[in-house]
Image (tube, rainbow, N blue to C red):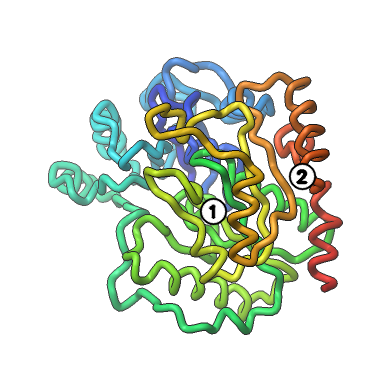
C-alpha cells in the first residue's frame, strides 16, 4: 500500500471534497497520512468530517506535511469539482509534489497527462501521473449480453435523490455491516473514489462511452459473481434519476437487474445540487413509485442529515418510517445494522 497525502486546498469542508471524505473514511489501496487544507490546519480530518478521530492530521502545506511525514509515495487530488476541472490553485502544489518525488493520483476529468509541463516534470523526476478517469480503450470495453440473468445473488442498488448524498459511503457501511454479521457481500464501484478505496470490481461510469455503460456494469457484476459467489451484491449509484445535470440510475435497475434499492435522501436539501434554478428535489414517495414501475423495490431509506441537529435527525427518521413503512437508517449516527434482517431475508429467498 502506498503512503498518500490528500490535497483539497480549502475545499475539505465542502461536498466537492467527497473523494477525500471517502478516503478518510477508509481505503484498502492507500495508507492515508494526512490532508492538505489550510483553513483547517491542525485538526483531525476524521473529526472534521463526522466527529470520529482517525489520526489523519490536516496540514497547511505539502512542505509542512513532509516535515512531519518525510516518507510519502503519492499525492491524491481529493476533490470532485463540477465538470471535473482541476482547480488552478492546485497546479503549483502538484508541481512541488512532483519535484519532491511524489507520484500524483487524479480522479478528475481534467487529465494530468494533458498538461505537457506536468508530464515533462514527472518524467524528469521519475514519478507517475495516474488519471483514474481516463476512458478505457475500445478493445477493453464490454457490451451487454444478458449474462447477468444468470446471477443468483440479490443485487441491491444504493441510489440517491441527488448528487453527493452519501451513496458510496452508505454502500460501504452496508458492506462492512454484512461482514461483521457473517454475510459475504460485494460492492461494485461506479466512480473514481470507489477505485481509490480499493474496489476490485467496477468501472468509472461517467468516463465510459454511453453505448458500453450497460455492458461494463454487467461485466463487473458477472465477474464478481463468478469469482467470489457472494451472498449479495451492492451497486454504488451515481447522481440521481432526476438531477438535470446528469440523470443516472436506470442502468442499475434495468441492465444491472437491481430489484432492490436502498434510497439515500437529505430531508433538508431542497434543490438539486443546491442550485435553485435546477429545480426542486421531488418527494421521496415519487422516486419510490418510479422505481417500482421499473420492477425495483425500495427496501430502506437512508438519511443524509446535513444541516440537521441530532433531534431533527431522529424526528425525520420517525416521520419517514411511519410514512413509508420501511426501515429508515441514520448511517452516520446509528450505522446500518437495522437493514441486516431485510438483507438476510433477501438471501433466504
Q: Residue at x 54, y 50 (%)?
A: 197
Q: Position of residue 61 (x, y in %)?
A: 38, 22
Label 1, residues with CA under 10 Å away: few <14, some 14-19, many ≥20: many
Q: Position of residue 166 (x, y in %)?
A: 58, 41
Q: Secondary structure at mark 2?
A: helix
Q: Nearer the viewer, mark 1 or mark 2?
A: 2
Relative to 147, residue 253 above or below: above
Q: Nearer the viewer, residue 43 or 96?
A: 43
Q: Nearer the viewer, residue 93 or 302?
A: 302
Find the distance from the CA under tag 1 to the CA under tag 2.
21 Å
Q: Position of residue 209 (x, y in %)?
A: 32, 65
Q: Position of residue 206 (x, y in %)?
A: 38, 55
Q: Is residue 337 visible?
A: no
Q: Residue at x 34, y 65 (%)?
A: 210
Instruction: Tell me the residue that label 2 is attached to.
Output: 324
Instruction: Tell me the residue that label 1 is attached to.
Output: 237
Relative to 322, residue 133 above or below: below
Q: Secondary structure at mark 1?
A: loop
Q: Is residue 233 left or right of residue 190?
A: right
Q: Residue at x 49, y 33 (%)?
A: 280
Residue 95 figure quarter: top left
Which quadrant is home to the C terminus?
bottom right
Sequence-wise first label, 1 or 2: 1
Q: Is residue 247 left or right of residue 111?
A: right
Label 2, residues with CA under 10 Å away: few <14, some 14-19, many ≥20: some
Q: Is residue 97 left or right of residue 24?
A: left
Q: Are marks 1 and 2 in contact (CB under 8 Å)?
A: no
Relative to 266, residue 172 above or below: below
Amino acid at each position: 500500500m502506498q503512503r498518500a497525502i490528500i490535497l483539497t486546498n480549502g475545499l475539505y469542508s465542502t461536498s466537492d471534497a467527497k473523494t477525500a471524505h471517502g478516503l478518510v473514511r477508509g481505503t484498502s489501496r492507500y495508507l492515508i497520512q494526512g490532508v492538505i487544507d489550510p483553513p483547517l490546519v491542525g485538526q483531525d480530518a476524521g473529526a472534521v468530517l463526522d466527529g470520529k478521530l482517525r489520526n489523519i492530521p490536516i496540514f497547511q502545506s505539502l512542505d509542512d506535511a513532509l516535515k512531519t511525514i518525510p516518507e510519502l509515495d503519492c499525492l491524491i487530488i481529493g476533490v470532485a469539482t463540477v465538470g471535473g476541472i482541476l482547480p488552478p490553485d492546485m497546479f503549483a502544489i502538484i508541481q512541488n509534489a512532483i519535484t519532491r518525488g511524489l507520484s500524483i493520483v487524479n480522479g478528475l476529468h481534467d487529465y494530468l497527462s494533458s498538461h505537457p509541463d506536468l508530464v515533462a516534470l514527472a518524467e524528469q523526476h521519475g514519478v507517475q501521473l495516474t488519471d483514474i478517469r481516463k476512458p478505457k480503450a475500445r478493445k477493453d470495453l464490454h457490451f451487454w449480453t444478458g449474462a447477468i440473468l444468470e446471477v443468483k445473488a440479490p443485487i441491491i442498488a444504493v441510489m440517491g435523490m441527488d448528487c453527493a448524498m452519501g451513496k458510496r459511503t452508505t454502500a460501504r457501511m452496508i458492506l462492512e455491516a454484512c461482514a461483521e454479521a457473517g454475510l459475504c457481500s460485494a460492492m461494485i464501484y461506479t466512480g473514481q473514489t470507489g477505485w481509490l478505496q480499493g474496489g476490485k470490481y467496477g468501472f468509472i461510469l461517467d468516463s465510459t462511452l454511453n453505448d458500453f455503460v450497460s455492458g461494463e456494469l454487467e461485466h463487473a457484476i458477472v465477474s464478481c459473481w463468478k469469482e467470489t459467489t457472494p451472498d449479495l451484491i451492492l451497486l454504488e449509484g451515481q447522481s440521481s434519476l432526476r438531477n438535470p445535470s446528469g440523470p443516472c440510475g436506470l442502468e442499475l435497475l434495468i441492465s444491472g437487474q437491481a430489484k432492490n434499492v436502498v434510497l439515500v435522501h437529505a430531508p433538508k436539501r431542497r434543490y438539486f445540487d443546491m442550485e435553485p434554478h435546477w429545480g426542486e428535489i421531488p418527494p421521496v414517495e415519487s422516486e419510490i413509485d418510479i422505481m417500482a414501475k421499473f420492477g425495483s423495490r425500495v427496501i430502506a431509506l437512508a438519511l443524509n442529515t446535513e444541516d440537521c441537529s441530532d433531534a431533527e435527525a431522529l424526528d425525520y427518521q420517525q416521520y419517514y418510517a411511519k410514512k413509508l413503512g420501511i426501515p429508515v437508517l441514520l448511517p452516520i449516527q446509528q450505522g446500518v445494522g437495522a437493514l441486516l434482517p431485510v438483507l438476510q431475508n433477501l438471501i433466504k429467498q
